[in-house]
């Protein structure tokens, strides 16, 4: 879904659509528990906190909700979500 929001909000300068097949390759997060444990140990377990990232995230969240209705109604977003859903269902 975030990729579809991206391609809707940040259109290419030349007007051409993004190649969604390329964008959706290798975008699934790992489901291996050891990856989650390793990430927590490396970041949270050592007291790491990115305060700059927190500020960026808060602003992004504010803008996301501000623009959510317009994005959801955009034909580019609808086409992207449809293609992404089809890819998820077919496994490609």
Image (tube, rainbow, N blue to C red):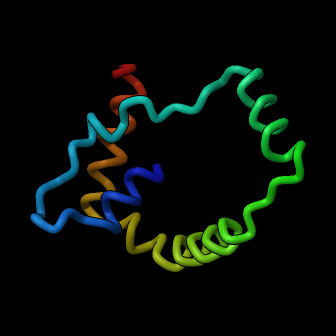
Write down the quadrant of residue 8 in the picture. Answer: bottom left
At horizontal 79% and vertical 39% (from top left) the residue drawn is 42
What number of labels is visible? 0
Q: Nearer the viewer, residue 82 or 29?
A: 29
At horizontal 28% and vertical 36% (from top left) the residue drawn is 22
At horizontal 46% and vertical 35% (from top left) the residue drawn is 27
20 shown above or below 71? above
Residue 11, image x and y in percent? 24, 65
Residue 23, image x and y in percent? 33, 41
Quarter containing the C terminus: top left
Residue 86, image x and y in percent? 34, 31
Residue 85, image x and y in percent? 39, 36
82 shown above or below 61? above
Is 90 on the left-hand or right-hand side of 47?
A: left
Is 24 on the left-hand or right-hand side of 60?
A: left
Write down the quadrant of residue 34 in the picture. Answer: top right
């Amino acid at each position: 879904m975030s990729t579809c929001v991206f391609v809707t909000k940040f259109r290419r300068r030349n007007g051409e659509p993004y190649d969604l097949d390329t964008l959706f390759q290798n975008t699934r997060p790992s489901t291996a528990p050891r990856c989650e444990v390793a990430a927590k140990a490396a970041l949270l377990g050592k007291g790491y906190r990115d305060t700059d990232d927190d500020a960026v995230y808060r602003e992004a969240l504010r803008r996301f909700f501000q623009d959510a209705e317009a994005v959801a109604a955009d034909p580019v977003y609808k086409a992207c979500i449809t293609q992404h859903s089809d890819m998820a269902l077919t496994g490609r």
